[in-house]
Structures are given as structure tokens and as C-alpha cells.
Image (cartoon, helix red, strand yellow):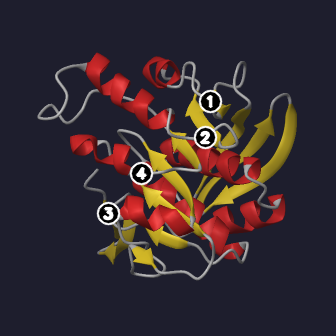
Amino acid sequence: MIGNLMESRTGIFVTRTHGKSTTSAMVSWILSVARRDPAVLVGAELCDSGHSGRAGKGDVLVVESCEFNHSFLDFHPAHAAILNVEQDHFDCYSDLESLTQAFHEFASKVPAGGVLVVNSGCDAAMEAVRDVSARIVTFGDPVVADWSAQAISDQPDGIRFEIHRRDRLWKKIGLRLHGHHNVQNALAAAALCAEIGVDAADIVAGLGSFGGVKRRFEVVGEWNEVTLIDDYA
């Protein structure tokens, strides 16, 4: 069904073993701020909207793309992000090599004119994008990646950091979320959106206003001066 929806829209897919719900939600939120009115299919509810998807009237479809049962090979991505590749879904893949091969088949579906954002610090992810047609953009390691997060600072109301594009400061970001893993999620979302032409101001505003997804380090309230956090992951 999702593959068929691609026939009339530009597909943007986010896949990995961890973090794909939050990152795909970030991408969709940024595109909404940028007035692209995307259609969205995410595997978790957004805290601010209470929904995991929306129809959207724009020409973009953002999808959290799962490797379970090789289902992501039915998709037709115009652009994608592979955030990491770690051994999972043992009922579908016998070992990391077979999983990496599946991600390679997925990456090969992104066309030559598309952008493929990849975690430079994950050897299996980098192996998965070897010899594909899409333009490869890396994020992660400040030394070797195209996009990196630096000057990370934890604050009571979230986390602050700088995004560097290659060796230059690109933008300063303030997240309402906690956790350095969310810095990497935001970095991947920013890199993907910037590389497909979204305005930098919209990316900064989108990340700054993003409220997270439910059950991913979700602050749900306080009781007897104890902060309650729901984080099944």
C-alpha cells in the first residue's frame, strides 16, 4: 500500500534499527513548518498532535521505514536516511551480513537524483550504501562526516548544540528533548531536509518547536516532586 502511494508523491524514508520514529517525525514536523504539508506515516504518536500520521495535500510522503520482513523493499524512495544498521529481527535475518544486504537493496532503490543520508559512524550502514546511485551525505563524526553536532550542552528544558556542515558552523539548535541520541536524530533530520532544499530557518524553527513522540523519553508529569518519564525504548 505504501509503495503504491509513492506513485504520485515524493517519498522520503527514514530507516534504521533505532531512532527511526523520532527522526521521521522530526522530518515531517520540519516540512510542516516549511509549509510543504506532507503526508506522514510514523510508527509512534507525536506528542503535540496526538497522531502518528496525516494525509497532507503536498507532494511529499514521509515514512518511517522498517526492515522487518523485508517490507521496506516494496517502497520507492526519492530520498532516504539510514541511521544505523544493527542486528535485529532474528526471525527475518540470520545474521548481520544478511541484514546489511537488505539495507543495501533498499539503498539501491534511491535514484541517482536522490539524497541518501547515512551515519558515518556505523560500519554496516556505510557498507550498505556502497556502490549505490544516490548522492551519499554523511552525518555523525565531526572529523569525517559532512554534518556533525558539536558544543552539546544539556539544559533543564532540553538540549542545545551546534550543527556544523563540514568544517563550518551551520546553525545553533535548541531542542525541547533530552538525550544525546536525540541530538543525532535531529542532526540526521536537519541534514536530510537541508540537502533536499528546505530553508535553514524552517529547519531550526521545526527542530526547536518539535515536542517529541510518545513513550520516547516522554515527560508525562510530576508526582510528589518526582518527575515521571515514559520511555519504553
In this image, 23 relative to 112: left or right? Answer: left
Q: CA distance from mark 1 to mark 2?
A: 6 Å
Q: Residues within 10 Å of mark 2 (few under 14, many from 20)?
A: some
Q: Are marks 1 and 2 in contact (CB under 8 Å)?
A: yes
**In the rendered view, would you say 55 is above or below 160?**
below
Question: Which-is-in-front pick, marks 2 and 3?
Answer: 2
What amino acid type is highlighted by mark number 2?
Pro
**In the rendered view, would you say 52 is above or below 4?**
below
Q: CA distance from mark 4 to mark 3?
A: 27 Å
Residue drawn at point x = 52 percent, y = 70 percent = 211
Look at the image and tell me whether residue 191 can be seen. yes
Which circle marks residue 75 in the picture? 4
Residue 112: image location, x then y, percent? 66, 37
Residue drawn at point x = 54 percent, y = 42 percent = 81
Between 167 and 37, the one lying in front of the other is: 37
Which circle marks residue 215 in the picture? 3
Which circle marks residue 111 in the picture? 2
Compare marks 1 and 4 and give the one earlier in the sequence: 4
Residue drawn at point x = 65 percent, y = 30 percent = 138
Which circle marks residue 133 in the picture? 1
Compare marks 3 and 1 and give the one earlier in the sequence: 1
Q: CA distance from mark 4 to mark 2?
A: 12 Å
Q: CA distance from mark 3 to mark 1?
A: 36 Å
Compare marks 2 and 3 and give the one earlier in the sequence: 2
Find residue 163 and report its image quarter: top right
